[in-house]
Amino acid sequence: GVLCVATINFAFILNLVTAPHNILTTNGILTYDLLVFSELIAVSVLPPVSVFAVAAINSICIVADMVLQPHSPELERLITSSTYTLLVRPLALQVMVAVVTFLWVSSAMRALERADRAEEIARLQRTIADQKQELEFGIQQIQMTLVTAANGNFSIRTPLAQENVLWQVAGSLNTLLARLQRSNQSEQELQRIQAEVVQLVNIVREAQAWRKPIRVTPTGTKLDPLLKELIGRYIVGSSSSGD
């Protein structure tokens, strides 16, 4: 159980500190919410009171990362406008999940201790088994989503229904993946535009050197309006310009 908790926290923290240029962005803050995953594991496989220790460690990691890791300009502006109220939500989520899960598990354990009949014990055991199965299913779905996203497929989503105890965690994960997908698409579009600009410069130079009309085709990027204006035009320049 300790190994599972440590591995999960290490994976999420490593994802933060190995961000591009080691900069914390507004998307990175959403990763803080996913640290409650380790609390759910701790309260399920370790003594229930251990969830508070895990919550404390998670909170320290969140504060340390927010203070020590360089911020993106967008996040810096957000912090300047709202001071450190950005930490309230992830820290409150850590405390809330720790308290709720502790009370839930403790209540279940006390109910088992009070059960003095085999039928009542059997019924409670079935309920706990169903809840454990539901939790394990949710964990498997989130793990599969994280593995797929780690391989570069940010279009994946965690298909957990609202009835599942992990649906809030899955919702935060899906929001993070959606933002990462949009960011990845924007980066790919920018790379395509940069490549098309280099190619366009070469075509214009060639057309000017050979005194022939510009021949370009639409590329499906935001450069298409410019390309349509250039099709068939001549580039007239002075032969003694020395360029």
Image: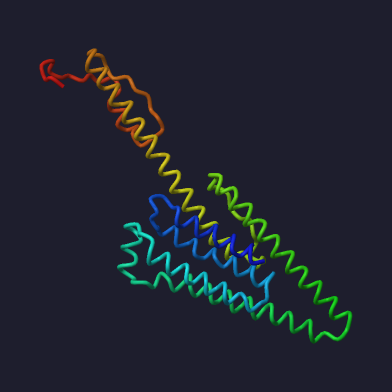
Q: Residue furthest front?
A: 3
Horizontal side of 17 relative to 150 (left or right) equals left
Q: Does 2 sit above or below residue 210?
A: below
- Quadrant of the snapshot with the C terminus: top left
Name the spot of residue 98 as percent of width and height, x first.
Answer: 58, 76
- Quadrant of the snapshot with the N terminus: bottom right
Name the spot of residue 234 as percent of width and height, x first.
Answer: 22, 19
The colour mode here is: rainbow
Q: Does 232 sit above or below residue 154?
A: above
**Residue at 22% in and 13% down:** 211
**Residue at 57% in and 75% down:** 53
Q: In this orientation, which residue lies closer to the viewer: 178 or 153?
A: 153
Horizontal side of 90 relative to 51 (left or right) equals left
Location of residue 174 (image quadrant): bottom right
Location of residue 83 (image quadrant): bottom left
Q: In this orientation, which residue lies closer to the viewer: 54 or 170?
A: 54
Name the spot of residue 162 as percent of width and height, x first.
Answer: 63, 65
**Residue at 74% in and 64% down:** 133
